[in-house]
Amino acid sequence: MCTRSRTSRRHYVCVPCRVSVKRRGAPGRDLCSRCGGELVDAGQDLAVPPKRDDAGWRALTALLRAGVTFHSGCCDGPGWRPRTPREVRERLAASHGTGLPVSEALTTRDVDELDARRRARRQVPRRGRAAGTNA
């Protein structure tokens, strides 16, 4: 049984300022107190990288731009998320040509699974062409 409160506070992030604030999820537009830019609702389970961690913030920026957040429905958390730019690049490269949405590719833990999907998609014959003909 889940004992986690449904009203827990969420992380709101300003990527340019590398600032995160925790607030209760209130409807409306939240603005950064430093730059006046819009804050992104990243969810309650975000592990905010330190301000000086350039690699961590690059990875977090890529995730937020792709629409990946750190919301969870219960105690099990939001699932796996890449923490380094290298992990982001690996997933994007492996998913190229699979037809998967970027957000789904970035949240796939196993890069080999993405490679298998890409290989399977290449082996499917294209419509309108008969096998063995050169058109």
Image (spheres, rainbow, N blue to C red):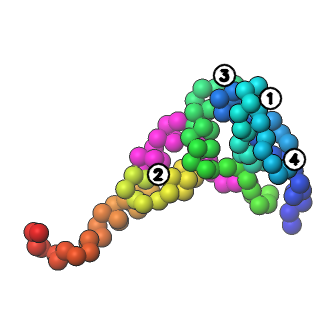
Residue 80 visible in image: yes
Mark 4 and mark 1: Cα distance apart in space: 17 Å
Asked if the residue at tag 1 contacts the one at tag 4, i.e. Cβ–Cβ closer than 8 Å, the answer is no
Question: What type is the residue that disc 3 sits on?
Answer: Arg
Mark 4 and mark 3: Cα distance apart in space: 26 Å
Q: Residue at x 57, y 29 (%)?
A: 55
Q: Residue under label 2, please give it.
A: 111
Mark 1 vs mark 3: in front: 1
Mark 3 and mark 2: Cα distance apart in space: 28 Å
From what the image shows, is residue 105 above or below residue 51?
below
In the rendered structure, the answer to whether residue 124 lies left or right of residue 106 reads left
Q: Position of residue 132 (x, y in %)?
A: 12, 73
Whichever of labels 4 and 3 marks the residue nearer the N terminus, that label is: 4
Question: What type is the residue that disc 4 sits on?
Answer: Arg
Mark 4 vs mark 3: in front: 4
Mark 3 vs mark 2: in front: 3
Asked if the residue at tag 2 contacts the one at tag 3, i.e. Cβ–Cβ closer than 8 Å, the answer is no
Q: Residue under label 1, please give it.
A: 33
Graded by Cα atoms within 10 Å as few (under 14), some (14 to 19) or many (20 or more), the crowding at tag 4 reads: few
Disc 2 element: helix
Disc 4 element: loop
Asked if the residue at tag 3 contacts the one at tag 1, i.e. Cβ–Cβ closer than 8 Å, the answer is no
Q: Residue at x 81, y 48 (%)?
A: 28
Disc 1 element: loop
Question: What type is the residue that disc 2 sits on?
Answer: Val
Whichever of labels 1 and 2 marks the residue nearer the N terminus, that label is: 1
Q: Residue under label 3, please give it.
A: 52
Residue situated in front as seen by the camera: 105 or 38: 38
Q: Position of residue 38 (x, y in %)?
A: 71, 38
